[in-house]
Image: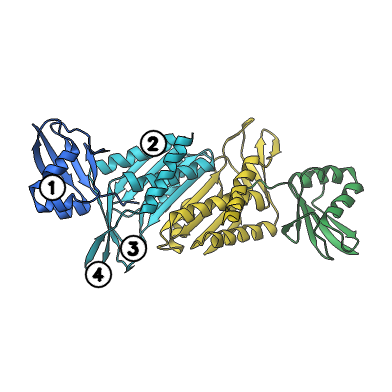
Chain colours: A blue, B green, C cyan, D yellow
Amino acid sequence: MARVTVKFFAQVRELAGVEEVPLSIEDNATLDSIRQVLSEQNESFKNALAGTIVMARNQTIVKADTKVADGDEIAFFPPVTGG
Amino acid sequence: MARVTVKFFAQVRELAGVEEVPLSIEDNATLDSIRQVLSEQNESFKNALAGTIVMARNQTIVKADTKVADGDEIAFFPPVTGG
Amino acid sequence: MVVATIQFEPLNIGQLQAQLFEQTKGAGACVCFTGSVRDYNKHGAIEGIELEHYPGMTEKALLALAASTQKKFNCDGVAIVHRVGKVLNHEPIVWVGTASAHREAAFNAAMYAMDALKQSVPLWKREWSGQHATWVDSKAADVKAFERWQTSVEDE
Amino acid sequence: MVVATIQFEPLNIGQLQAQLFEQTKGAGACVCFTGSVRDYNKHGAIEGIELEHYPGMTEKALLALAASTQKKFNCDGVAIVHRVGKVLNHEPIVWVGTASAHREAAFNAAMYAMDALKQSVPLWKREWSGQHATWVDSKAADVKAFERWQTSVEDE
């Protein structure tokens, strides 16, 4: 099992209703499978993760099929709008 | 007859040996004909006006076939190099 | 010289400009971009914005962007400073400064940094109007602006 | 807002940046370009430059350029300030500032103003090295840089 922290930002954070959530998931899980697992946990997460989501692993933007490891910091957020 | 003042700048001024020269020329003369007349006046003017010359009439860049009028301020100078 | 900073305090863009110029003395060409809060959006008047960031990652992403911009355009210096938190109407949100031996590289570097920032740095804007704060959607034009740089890299 | 100035005194580019920003408050995008004296040319070290101008015409041409740039790119503001006379190594020679609702217009306006200035404003540079002052030749690259704007106008 891999224990990870999942962080949310902006609209995703508001819809999720929390800033972050701890999660235990099978080894070799991908970010996309984390998204799936959370979406099935409750309606808030489902709504929060329904749209276009950017994913980061340990503070670097990565693809949805990236695998996670124990201790990872995962983040889900909407397309950025700085500048 | 049109009486005009011809000004020189930069390399053209240095080669001409003067900053400006008064000139009386036939009505309907062009800037190019002024260049010709001056080039025949002496070797300094000839050298000064031999290369690529930008021409201005009353402080506006114009083409060589532009006609001059009495009282005009004419200028001959090399391509600009500001900035 | 590569600098990237986020700050809650207002930006002093005159000072940033003077500092960059001093720190890249004699480079030849220096370009600065300042983006500021407009007092309207497509729906009407707004009363300022609020910028959310991802503490830790935003700083890293901004520094990585400044460093890659410096390398990509072979600049003497690249500096990026971004506001976070509440930003009032007309205040600067972001300042990008570049220095290079030639103006084309300095202009391209500043344009690239802005286009890439709007795609890759975790910052999210919401606009205040009355009691409501509305999240700003990402723009298709910004995606397109960034894509031209990827094409130009492939052309090389 | 359209401003064009020539001056013998050093440019305070931080102040110019702050002024432009203040005078075009809330425009959204502001771009500044500073060109400065490099301490070398292709032949080696130099000891500063000297800029000759055409009193009367230089001021008029600079103002016409600022006004046409403002119109061409629909800017809120365009300011151009150019040194004349002796300019030491590393000092700014020219400062161009533009303000617009969108960054693309502000960047394009600043690039255009620089490219056009190098073709149309009566200013001539010579570089000092030892006891010699050598007139700088106009560059083919600068002619080409300006020509791209003429093509883009024809495309419209």
The disc placed on residue D53 is none
User: Marks 3 and 1, how far apart in space?
Assistant: 38 Å
Q: Secondary structure at mark 3?
A: loop
Question: Residue C71: which quarter of the image?
Answer: top left
Tag 1: amino acid? Ser
How many marks do you count on the picture?
4
Q: Secondary structure at mark 1?
A: helix
Residue, disc 1? A39
Instruction: Pick whichever of labels 3 and 4 is earlier in the sequence.
Output: 3
User: Marks 1 and 4, how far apart in space?
Assistant: 33 Å
Q: Are marks 3 and 2 on the same chain?
A: yes
Task: For residue B44, say whether it is visible.
Answer: yes
User: Marks 4 and 2, how far apart in space?
Assistant: 40 Å
Q: Residue at x 47, y 39 (%)?
A: C152
Residue, disc 2? C68
* Percent x, y of residue D65: 61, 58
The disc placed on residue C89 is 3
